[in-house]
Each structure stands twice: as structure tokens, then as C-alpha cells.
Amino acid sequence: MNIIWKIKTFENLSPYELYQILKLRINVFMLEQECLYPECDNKDLKAEHLFGFHENSIIAYARLLPPGISYKESSIGRVVTASDYRKFGIGRELMEKAIERILIEFPSNGIRISAQAHLQIFYESVGFQKETEPYLEDNIPHIEMALKVNKYRD
């Protein structure tokens, strides 16, 4: 599958790219998962946006945040793959690219995420470790997970 990957700051997103990102996030998080939450939380303004295009649509996306926005560490959030493209390994490729970019762009003492609890094994497979017991975030069980930079680089 030919996916074109891009990373852009908020200011450099085209209106079409921004529309496609918000459409994907809303379709999955709000409609598919039936979760109402403030999608536009101002963090997008400070983030880098990693996304994959296939056949003129954004099919995968992650928001990359520098330290001090969500956590003291850098963070990856709003990780999403369009439903028609799941099971092709795109989520893994997306996370690998996100981790690589953060290690280059936002050097810190690690990366922290708030992961949906049912995805724990997936995030462990790319190097994250569970740090908290499950908690409800927007009525979905989540866990905090961390990737220690030194362990990932070894």
C-alpha cells in the first residue's frame, strides 16, 4: 500500500489537510467510539501533526506534543487509523514514525501517552510500559504509558 507520510506544524497545514484530520478524528473518536469530548483543545496549535495519505484521503494520524503541554515529557496523542485501513500494520508504522520524530524533534527524558486500555499490548509492542492502573477518560478506560528514551535507543 502506497502511503505518503507528512509531518507539519499547525500553521503549515493546508485547509484540506486540517479538514481531513478533523474528519478522521471525529469519525473514529466521536462517532465510532461514541465519545463526546472537546476535540479542539488548543493543543493542536502547539503540535506537530503526523499523517498518512492514501488515495487522496488521510487514513492515519497522530499528534506530537513537545514536553510541558500534556505531560512533563513529550507526548503522542489522537492516534488514529481509518476503519477501512486497520489490520494492515499502518498503526504500527504510524507509531514508529511518531516515536522517531519525537526522538529527533523533542529530545526529553521520555515519551508519555494516555492509551486506551484495550490497546496496551499494541503500545507495549512499540516500547511503551504501563505506568498507571486504568482510569476513565471520556468514559473509556485508559492507562498512562511511558517510553523511556534510553531504553528505546539501545
Image (cartoon, rainbow, N blue to C red):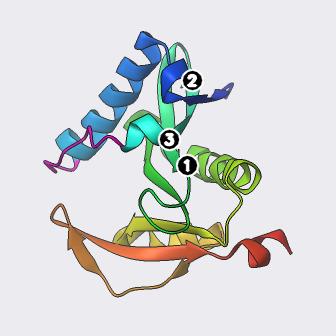
Could you say whether the residue bearing mark 1 is in a helix, strand or loop? helix
Which tag, 1 or 3, sits closer to the chain's start?
A: 3
| Residue matched to label 3 | 47
Q: Quadrant of residue 125?
A: bottom right
Magenta highlight range: 33-42
Q: Residue at x 44, y 56 (%)?
A: 69
Q: Is residue 88 visible?
A: no
Query: Residue 113: x, y in percent?
Result: 47, 65
Residue corresponding to mark 1 = 91
Residue found farthest to the front: 68
Q: Nearer the viewer, residue 50 or 86?
A: 50
Q: Is residue 32 above or below residue 7?
A: below
Which of the marked residues, 2 or 1, is nearer the chain's N terminus?
2
For the residue carrying disc 1, how many other residues have a C-alpha within 10 Å: few (<14), some (14-19), or many (20+)? many
Which residue is at the front of the view, 131 or 29?
131
Identified by mark 1, the residue type is Gly
Dot 3: what SS?
loop
Residue 31: give its label: none
